[in-house]
Image (cartoon, rainbow, N blue to C red):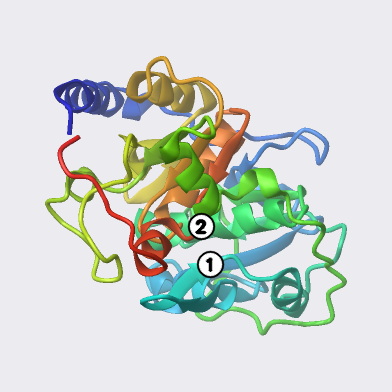
Amino acid sequence: MRTGALTRYLMLALALAIAVPGLAGAQSGTSMADIGPVVDAGWALDHQDDVTLINVSRRPSNYEETGFIAGAPFVGMGEFLTERPGLKGTIRYLAPTAGQFETVMQGLGVDAGDMVVIAPAGTTVYGDATVASRLYWQLKYFGHDNVAILDGGVAAWDAAGGEVSDSPAASPGGGSYTAGEPRGELLATTAEVEAVIAGDEAAQLVDNRPLPQFTGVMSKDYVDGSGHLPAARPVPFNLFVAPREGVVYWRTPDEVRGIVSAMLPGVEGRIIDYCNSGHVSSLAWFAMSEIGGMADVALYDGSLHEWTLDGERSLVIGQ
């Protein structure tokens, strides 16, 4: 990593650590008309009869400490992702087709006009908050804007007096949800990333993985290589959340914009967030695009998994 980037990261981490006690992590609306992408537990409790609550995490065991929101079904990450063959193996973790996604959402009982509130367990970031943001991104990608994430998840819901249960409700089925035309501007493809690297298209590639993976010190076994995409700059995903007393809350819009300004000085125009599999980068996308209100932020859902297993493409270490 360049010295400047590391210095900015350390200074930002210190500033955020000092700021944590005073955070107001959720944007709480007072009516259905003015809610934001994040709703707090109090709002969700007041409107639980008006919204469709869904427990969402990587696996049901993530709810062992918190329980599930009573009466709400559960969906795991593997249920709303798909895969396809690549040149060097199966490419997993990809956005499904419209038909596949419709089947999942209808099975959860989601209707076309529903306000969907996504409820992670709320006690961890990786595999929980990141899964909530990935489902949110897919709903937006297929045109469903009436969606929010519950700040602090079920942990905050329980603390606010919401009813929890040891198991989720059975998926009711019968929903009328219909996937709309995919919003291509929200999805970056490998072809677009290649064009950016070649200088044929303008965008800033942003690596949202932990810094040891960006630098090439560590790598995932489903990525064929170490390092990062050429000209990418690091903005680790976990900067955008603020765990307090064991509960994971989102940072405020001003804090999100401050993080981006500090880590990506001078960057304007399109941003493409990526990670190993489009999982943790969905959290960064959610923070930048939805909380921070930044225009033209896309998610490379295949990320380095697709980049390295679907062609002979190299990564960069130390630049």
Circle nearer the N terminus (1, 2)? 1
Numbered badge on residue 300: none
Q: Above or below — where is 178 with respect to 279?
A: below
Residue type at mark 1: give it: Leu
Most foreground residue, 113 or 141: 141
Image quarter (top left, top right, bottom left or bottom right) of the C terminus: top left
The secondary structure type at the circle numbered 1 is strand
For residue 270, which quarter of the picture?
Answer: top right
> Residue 103, image x and y in percent?
74, 78
- Identify the residue under disc 2: 301
The secondary structure type at the circle numbered 2 is loop
> Residue 98, image x and y in percent?
74, 68
Q: Above or below — where is 204 with respect to 311?
A: above
Within 10 angstroms of label 1, few (less than 14), some, or many (20 or more) residues? many
Left or right position of 141 against 128: right
> Residue 250, image x and y in percent?
47, 39
Tags 1 and 2 touching, CB below 8 Å: yes
Any part of residue 13 in sight? yes
For the image shown, how many numbered marks are present on the structure?
A: 2
Which residue is painted at 36% across and 44% down in the image?
208
Most foreground residue, 113 or 50: 113
Residue type at mark 2: give it: Asp
- Identify the residue under disc 1: 94
> Residue 261, image x and y in percent?
41, 19
Which residue is painted at 21% across and 24% down in the image?
14
